[in-house]
Image (spheres, grey):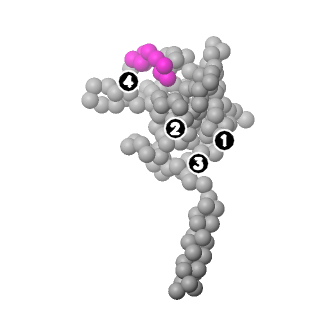
Amino acid sequence: MKNLFKISIALLSLIFVFTACSTPKNTTTGATNVSRGKFVGTWTLNNVSYDGLVQNAVQNVFDQAAPEAFVGSTWKLTNSGNGIYTLNNGTSQTIFWSVYNGGTTGTQFQFKKLYQGDKAKNVAEGYRLDIANNDGSTMVLKSPVAVGNSTGYIIYSFTKNN
């Protein structure tokens, strides 16, 4: 009986070691496999477009500015989840970002705005954008906007800076 117990403990320990040392989890968006590492770096938002919305229908995004004000902004995302975006007018916003795998629309990029003295774990509100594409050098994020009984999207197209 003691040997059976020792073998069971040894097997459970071995299983634990293999699962703890497995490769990091990748996120999936449709047919595209997107790892968290593909987000790390400095990105430039090159274009804002609309799907199912008329231009200027949305006056303010991320409780900050009009969508067009983000064109040309830079987004610095670190592996630790810390980040900052800077608009062309010099306005900067510290964020904490992550990839969310529980959305009904698939994998999403999410971030919280952080202000002086804030800790990300204490900030309850944030933003989620659907990941349409991220191949490591270009990224397309879609922000859903309710329009009557349907959903339109603000589409943000980024390129990674070298």
Q: Is 118 rendered above or below residue 20?
A: above
Range of the magenta residues? 55-63
Q: Are there few (<14), some (14-19), or many (20+) residues within 10 Å of tag 4?
A: some
Q: Is residue 58 magenta?
A: yes
Q: Position of residue 37 (x, y in %)?
A: 63, 45
Q: Are there few (<14), some (14-19), or many (20+) residues within 10 Å of tag 3?
A: some
- In the picture of the structure, the residue carrying the numbered disc 3 is 35
Q: Is residue 15 magenta?
A: no
Select label 4 or label 3 by which is in front. Answer: 3
Q: Residue at x 56, y 54 (%)?
A: 25
Q: How far apart are marks 1 and 2 (CA)?
A: 14 Å
Q: Which residue is drawn at 48% across and 31% down?
A: 124
Left or right: where does residue 152 sit relative to residue 135?
left
Residue type for callout 3? Ser
Q: How far apart are marks 3 and 1 (CA)?
A: 11 Å
Where residue 18 sits, quadrant-wise, is bottom right
The image's mark for residue 79 is 1
Residue extending farthest front = 2
Q: Is 110 rendered above or below residue 7?
A: above
Q: How far apart are marks 2 and 3 (CA)?
A: 11 Å
- In the picture of the structure, the residue carrying the numbered disc 4 is 53
Q: Earlier in the sequence, mark 2 or mark 3?
A: 3
Q: Distance between the residues labelled 2 and 4?
A: 21 Å
Indicate the secondary structure of the residue bearing disc 4: loop
- In the picture of the structure, the residue carrying the numbered disc 2 is 109
Q: Earlier in the sequence, mark 4 or mark 1?
A: 4
Indicate the secondary structure of the residue bearing disc 1: loop
Disc 3 + disc 1, Cβ < 8 Å: no
